[in-house]
Image: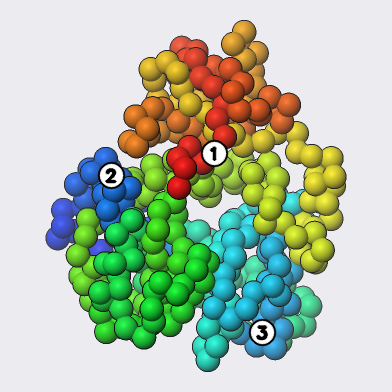
């Protein structure tokens, strides 16, 4: 099967980006270097093409009820122009995906927009349609992934950079997890105060065919998925397929550290199972780990006690460009998840001294 291409593919090729297969999309992994791009976002500003993320809209009289039945958070709490983070779970409470759900500004044709991870847009569209049809709900569900481009501008200088190219909205009035209509480089867009880096920043949804105009107007360091990964890891943010996967890494929101997104006073698929987990507590928890010894923790590496007793495994790891230290996310027994606990990470057969850290690794 051929890879899907983002609307800026030709622009990225001209910029000599290197590419990778991510969720069935051919995406830029780096332009100059991961470190250069990472440091630009932490110190100044960088831009990302994240058009591999899905966009699905839900409209109609029963759009809120339909969406509520499939996500863990409380959709009814959203006012127009607000967004929330949520998990999408199966009947056993296992995470299928995580998502940001937007209640669109007043006057929008559609009422809700939610963002599944790369390669999940078809599956999640079918999930919404199946639930709608099974319950006889009046709602229109549309997969808009190849209609919208999605760009992110992130970093301390992001508000100033984006404001210079934006009309119709004062960006300083947008709080975190709010979204508004505006024009960026003359292109009608949705502008959201959201991001995946821990820095101040925005995500922009614009028509697919207008992506080049918006991207070109944002004159700053282009960044690939490599820097996006190191940035999100420093913040302890989850990555679908790494920190959770319904088959390879089946986890509930409580295990993955996002139990705060679960509103048990609402009705959603997996609610009953998660009520039990909430009452008893998860057996394992996702924790941060920082190596004391030299070495880089990678996905799948074992985590043990100092005596070599198995504890768990690493889900994601890297050498933190900001901290200059090796960091990781890993699952360990809940009883051994306290910050400061001494552990070992087995790197290429060698147990390396490490300690459990609270996340985020950075104070942002």
**In this rendering, does residue 179 appear at all?**
yes
How far, Cα to Cα, is label 2 from label 1? Answer: 20 Å
Numbered circle sitting on residue 39: 2
Disc 1, SS: loop
Q: Is residue 345 left or right of residue 89?
A: left
Residue 303 higher or lower than 272, as above or below: above
Label 1: which residue?
A: 359
Between discs 2 and 1, the one toward the N terminus: 2
Task: Answer whether labels 2 and 1 touch (C-beta < 8 Å).
Answer: no
Q: Residue furthest top?
A: 307
At 52% across and 88% down in the image, what residue appears?
A: 108
Tell me the quarter of the picture where residue 102 sits.
Answer: bottom right
Q: Quadrant of the N terminus?
A: bottom left
**In this rendering, does residue 26 appear at all?**
no
Between discs 2 and 3, the one toward the N terminus: 2
Label 3: which residue?
A: 139
């Amino acid at each position: 099967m051929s890879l899907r291409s983002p609307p800026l593919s030709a622009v990225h090729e001209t910029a000599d980006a290197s590419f990778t297969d991510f969720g069935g999309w051919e995406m830029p992994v780096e332009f100059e270097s991961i470190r250069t791009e990472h440091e630009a976002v932490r110190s100044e500003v960088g831009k990302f093409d994240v058009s591999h993320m899905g966009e699905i809209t839900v409209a109609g009289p029963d759009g809120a009820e339909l969406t509520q039945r499939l996500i863990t958070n409380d959709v009814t709490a959203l006012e127009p122009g607000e967004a929330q983070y949520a998990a999408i779970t199966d009947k056993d409470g296992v995470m299928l995906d995580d998502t940001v759900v937007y209640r669109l500004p007043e006057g929008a044709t559609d009422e809700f927009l939610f963002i599944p991870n790369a390669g999940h847009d078809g599956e999640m569209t079918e999930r919404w349609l199946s639930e709608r049809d099974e319950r006889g709900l009046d709602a229109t569900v549309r997969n808009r992934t190849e209609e919208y481009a999605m760009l992110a501008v992130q970093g301390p200088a992001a508000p100033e950079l984006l404001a210079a190219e934006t009309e119709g909205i004062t960006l300083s009035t947008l709080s975190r997890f709010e979204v508004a209509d505006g024009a960026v480089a003359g292109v009608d867009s949705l502008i959201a105060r959201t991001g995946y880096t821990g820095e101040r920043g925005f995500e922009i949804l614009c028509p697919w065919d207008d992506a080049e105009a918006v991207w070109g107007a944002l004159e700053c360091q282009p960044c690939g998925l490599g820097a996006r990964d190191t940035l999100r890891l420093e913040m302890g943010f989850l990555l679908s397929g790494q920190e959770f996967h319904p088959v390879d890494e089946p986890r509930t929101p409580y295990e993955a550290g996002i139990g705060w997104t679960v509103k048990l006073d609402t009705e959603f698929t997996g609610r009953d199972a998660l009520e039990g987990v909430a009452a008893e507590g998860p057996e394992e928890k996702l924790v941060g780990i920082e190596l004391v010894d030299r070495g880089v923790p990678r996905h799948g590496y074992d985590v043990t006690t100092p005596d070599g007793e198995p504890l768990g495994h690493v889900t994601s790891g890297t050498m933190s460009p900001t901290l200059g230290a090796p960091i990781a996310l890993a699952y360990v027994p809940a009883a051994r998840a306290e910050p400061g606990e001494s552990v070992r990470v087995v790197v290429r057969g060698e147990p390396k001294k490490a300690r459990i850290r609270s996340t985020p690794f950075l104070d942002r």
